[in-house]
């Protein structure tokens, strides 16, 4: 795919423009827009950079995209832009795979340690001025299932293994002797394997097959002592059934960074439930992440101008970058 001379680039970004865009502005006519102006910005544009990756505005404005050939989204997940009109078109879709892997892995290790070492109660007791000795759990030797075997799942597996945990994976295909997971179970048979694990980490991409995969049956299959961590997509979970499982004691706790509805509604019972840790979709957001996202896009933009193959091309049928694809940037690895 070769960029035209004097290409036009639409950038969906809202009020906060992406940083460090000067070199791109020198090489293209750049139209910055919020959701309301997206249709106008798409008319006559050759490419679209979805910097506001939480926006759901692209499907509604897509009819105005009369010559877009390439869409890049500033996230690993592509579900906000993988609608039928794009899926069935010839538009090349790329993502920002690799940027958030290690940061999310650190978050997962952090919440596992928080559960095991009872940090939340320690803070409560500290604020109350109460000295109360307790015993806490070890994480070494505990069994973890990471559901989603892409680059983020692999980073999580490596981090938790380094801490002494025993990690397995669940993905589209079952296999043995995986370099990061050892055993990978088939996610279609998830409920058969869930009873074996002390921690279950959801990081699968959102597809028709994975939507709602953590439902009442999945939570009922887990150990009563198990903890559930979701750093994938909120829609992987049937929230009402997770709440019911927590209330019934079917699982021991949950750490949630993503939700079916964001922001999490004020009336949600999750806000005040014991043994539930919440964060506002920030598990991968390290200091400097916005600039790194622009660096990834800028690298692909240079390749586009040069007519070179783009990095991180998403298979629009699968909804993610296939495992055999090669990452191009230093922080992106092909897994």
Image (tube, grey):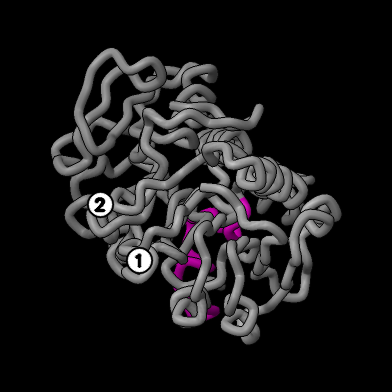
Residue 2, compared with residue 114, is above or below; it is below
Badge 1 local density, few (<14 within 10 Å), some, or many (20+)? Answer: many
User: Which numbered marker is on residue 239?
Assistant: 1
At x 38% / y 15%, what residue is drawn? 179
Side of 233 relative to 100 (left or right) = left
Side of 302 relative to 114 (left or right) = right
Residue 67 in view, yes or no: yes
At x 49% / y 25%, what residue is drawn? 160
Disc 2 is placed on an element classified as helix
- Nearest the camera: 293 or 262? 293
Side of 321 relative to 22 (left or right) = left
Quarter of the image where one finds residue 209: bottom left
Residue 19 x/y as whole percent: 81, 56
Q: Which residue is mark 2?
A: 219
Quarter of the image where one finds residue 311: top right
Quarter of the image where one finds residue 310: top right
Secondary structure predominantly adopted by residues drawn in magenta: loop
At x 28% / y 34%, what residue is drawn? 170
Is residue 152 on the magenta stretch? no
User: Which numbered marker is on residue 62?
Assistant: none
Q: CA distance from mark 1 to mark 2?
A: 11 Å
Q: Which residues are magenta?
A: 264-282
Label 1 or label 2, whichever comes before in sequence order = 2
Disc 1 is placed on an element classified as helix
């Amino acid at each position: 795919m070769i960029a035209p001379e004097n290409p036009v680039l639409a950038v969906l970004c809202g009020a906060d423009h992406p940083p460090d865009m000067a070199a791109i502005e020198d090489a293209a006519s750049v139209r910055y827009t919020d959701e309301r102006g997206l249709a106008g910005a798409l008319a006559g544009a050759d490419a679209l950079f979805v910097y506001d990756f939480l926006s759901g505005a692209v499907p509604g404005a897509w009819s105005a995209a009369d010559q877009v050939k390439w869409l890049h989204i500033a996230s690993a997940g592509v579900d906000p832009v993988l609608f039928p009109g794009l899926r069935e078109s010839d538009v090349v879709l790329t993502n920002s795979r690799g940027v958030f892997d290690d940061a999310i892995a650190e978050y997962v290790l952090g919440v596992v340690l928080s559960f095991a070492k009872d940090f939340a109660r320690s803070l409560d007791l500290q604020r109350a001025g109460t000295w109360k000795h307790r015993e806490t759990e070890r994480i070494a030797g505990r069994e973890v299932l990471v559901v989603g075997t892409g680059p983020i799942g692999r980073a999580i597996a490596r981090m938790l293994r380094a801490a002494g945990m025993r990690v397995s994976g669940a993905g589209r295909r079952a296999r043995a002797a995986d370099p990061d997971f050892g055993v990978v179970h088939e996610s279609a048979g998830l409920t058969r394997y869930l009873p074996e694990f002390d921690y279950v980490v959801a990081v699968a991409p959102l597809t028709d097959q994975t939507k709602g995969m953590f439902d009442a049956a999945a939570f009922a299959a887990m150990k009563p002592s198990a903890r559930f961590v979701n750093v994938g997509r909120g829609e992987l979970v049937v929230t009402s059934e997770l709440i019911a499982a927590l209330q019934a004691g079917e699982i021991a706790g949950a750490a949630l960074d993503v939700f079916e509805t964001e922001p999490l509604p004020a009336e949600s019972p999750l806000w005040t439930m014991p043994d539930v840790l919440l964060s506002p979709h920030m598990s991968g957001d390290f200091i400097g992440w916005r600039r790194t996202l622009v660096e990834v896009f800028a690298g692909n933009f240079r390749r586009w101008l040069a007519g070179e193959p783009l990095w991180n091309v998403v298979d629009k049928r699968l909804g993610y970058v296939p495992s055999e694809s090669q990452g191009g940037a230093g922080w992106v690895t092909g897994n």
